[in-house]
Amino acid sequence: MPGLVRGMARTAAVVGTATATRNAVNRRQADKNVAAYSHAVQQQAPPPQQYAPPPQEYYEAPPPSQDDTIAQLERLGALKAQGLLTEEEFAAQKAKILGM
């Protein structure tokens, strides 16, 4: 039996050493992970500040081309011919289209 006890003691010592070594390696790796994470967090740029969106730029529409003007006058004339516009409404819209 003394050989068995010695064998068990040797096995316990080997297992204890292996466990201690594994724990030390795990602890070292965890420390490295914490250091790497802390370094990465410090290296990140701060979040951008929130500003109001830039104002939209407005521009004047380009003057209508001659074709557009003619098409508008033709539609206006058709509305008058159908009786949907009075002579005064027609004259006012025509002056508006021609820029008078």
Image: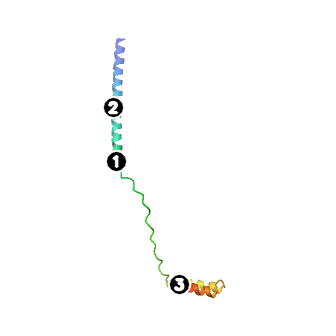
Pick the residue in front: 70 or 47: 47
The numbered disc on residue 24 is 2
Q: Residue at x 35, y 40 (%)?
A: 34
Q: Which of pointers 3 and 1 indicates the residue nearer the eye?
A: 1
Name which of mark 3 and mark 2 comes first in the sequence.
2
Pick the residue in front: 66 or 13: 66
Q: Residues within 10 Å of mark 2 (few under 14, many from 20)?
A: few
Quadrant position of residue 92:
bottom right
The residue beneath circle 3 is 69
Q: Where does the image place residue 38, in percent across and percent down from the top left?
A: 35, 44
Residues at discs 3 and 1 in contact (Cβ within 8 Å): no
Element at label 1: helix
Q: Residue at x 60, y 86 (%)?
A: 90
Colour setup of the view: rainbow
Name which of mark 1 and mark 2 comes first in the sequence.
2
Q: Which of pointers 1 and 2 indicates the residue nearer the eye?
A: 1
Left or right for 65, reference 87: left
Pick the residue in front: 74 or 61: 61
Amino acid carrying mark 2 in the image? Ala
Q: Is residue 26 above or below residue 70?
A: above
Amino acid carrying mark 1 in the image? Gln
Left or right for 1, reference 96: left
Q: Residue at x 33, y 41 (%)?
A: 35
Q: Quadrant of the N terminus?
A: top left
The numbered disc on residue 8 is none
